[in-house]
Amino acid sequence: MKKTKNCKILPPHPYLGELKDQFQTGKVSRRDFLRQATLLGMSAVAATTFSSAMFPFPAYATSTAQPKRGGTFKFAVKIKGVDDPARLSWVDGSNIVRLVSEHLTVTDSENVTHPQLLERWAASEDLKTWDLYLRKGIKFNNGDEMTAADVMFTFKHWLTKSNGSSMFGLLSYIGGFQNVEKVNPYQIRLHLEKPNIAVPEHLFHYPGMLLHRDFDGDFLKKPIGTGPFILSEFVEGERCIMTARKDYWRKGLDGLPLPYIDRVMFLDMDKDAAIAALCTQQIDAIMTPRPSDYLTAKNIPGLVTYPVKTANTFVVKMRIDTAPWDDNRVRTAMKMCQDRKKLLRLAAFNEGVVGIDAHVAPVHPEWCPKPTPKYDPEGALKLLKEYAKEKDLQLPLKVTLSTKNNLDEPSIAQGLKEMALPGGFDIQLDITEPGGYWSRWTEVSFGITSWSHRPLGTMILPLAYTKESIGAWNETRWHDEEFTKYLREAEATLDVNQRREIMCKLEDIMQERGPIGISYYSHRWEILLEKWKNVKAHPSQYTEYIKEMWMDS
């Protein structure tokens, strides 16, 4: 672990002056200014004040409703076992854990990152040194004060590869736990081996909850956290019950500790049962509504929908260490069999935007627009004939496509099966309950995996398409030296327009020789009974709003 001889306080990042100039001259948008300024350590209040002074926000009517206390919130979700939060690989589980165990930072529904358990942070000019300052006086639900000891324990846990956390690959630029320094009981210093602009956003990655220093590997046995709720009951496949703490560190608008509500009940339901229960007001909300659920609910009295544009998508993944996907001709042929507009219509009722075969979405600030690849089964068949002749195989090429059944995946799978047949593929479908897929999602050779939103394109790519992410979330085993070189450049590039130029190269590489197909990016919604107030949809489907919502009955 590194030691700092002269522990100087990092000054405001010098790029903030240039960023202000870019905003004033219209080179970056307000949203990109707020996102970038806060990442560099400028407070959200200061950034918002500056941007509003230059170009005032339009006036909107504000609610005069006062928060009320009490009530139980019933939420339909799949209840799967949880042991180590750092190994979570599905959002539903993280939304349960996050009510008990919190993150150091929080990225809001506008993709602006704020301190949560941190009070603030600061970055050096070269983005290789980051100081993290903890809030003082925050208590875990067992009475212990949160200190740097807990943060050090958590970073060590993340950066130990054998623990199997996706944080290991995401934070690979740190270079190992030896580069994490405890400066004092309320300050941590990160000495990065490679510069990275997105450290604060990475700390809000959903397996990135702060662990108590005594965590022993089983969260359900010792559910210790700083969050507003206490885990009262957990029955896998049935229910999870949370009760409100009386001593949570954050205060509500009435000056008393949050949360406003008394209890949260997570109830295990499949999607069809959940939407029926919601429409008859037997429950209050459902996790990750499907487009069909949104279309059903939006015209039903008593329900309110909260929309948000996202980078959520369904990745058609091909493992490059298994035949036939180890041959780029076969991967390219499969990509050519996607009729993207038709799949968006069939699976998502046009509630989204078409994609390209690179895992960067239009909502990302560094997204580089590219032409939408055409559906070309004739071109696919030509490639497969060449491959089959070389391997002495008969066409159509038989492959099995595995996925789960609770969101858009079955419609995508069936559509792709039909679209790929004239391209020379005979696709057999293996569609299971979510648990049946998530238990093997990194092992199946050809599948459809739902991937959640991340606020930056440079955050998604290191999670799944680098050598360091193999063994965690790199489900395709694909990595590419040129791709990684450009990715590291993008992660270290402050100017969003320059970062977009690098992203253009990254997108080209993924389309030319990458391991995935992406037909579209999904819109998302929160759908709740209208009695629940102070609700905001989050593009990552994180239910942070539960901490501050109230019931107006």
Image (cartoon, rainbow, N blue to C red):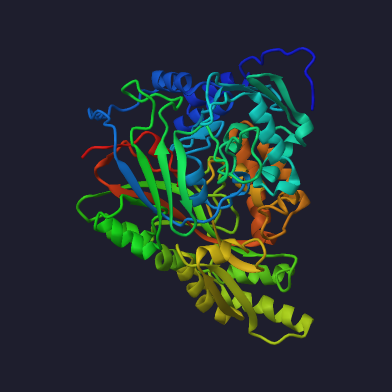
Residue lying at 31% horizontally and 49% vertically, measured from the top left: 284
Q: Observer-nearest residue: 246 or 174? A: 246
Tell me if residue 92 comes above or below residue 154 in the rendering. Answer: below
Percent position of residue 75, x then y = 37, 50
**In front of the other: 5 or 548:** 548
Instruction: State the image coordinates of residue 462 (x, y, percent, origin top left).
Output: 67, 46
Q: Is residue 156 left or right of residue 97?
A: right
Q: Quadrant of residue 446?
A: bottom right
**Depth order, front residue of 310/526:** 526
471 sits left or right of 206 in the view: right
Q: In this view of the protein, can residue 479 be seen by the observer?
A: yes
Residue 268 in the image: state x and y as whole percent.
42, 58
Q: Quadrant where the N terminus lies?
A: top right
Image quadrant where residue 356 sits: bottom right
Q: Please provide percent x and percent y for residue 335.
A: 60, 67
| Quadrant (top left/top right/bottom left/bottom right) for the C terminus | top left
Is 388 drawn above or below residue 81 in the view shown?
below
| In this rendering, position of residue 414 left or right of residue 130 | left
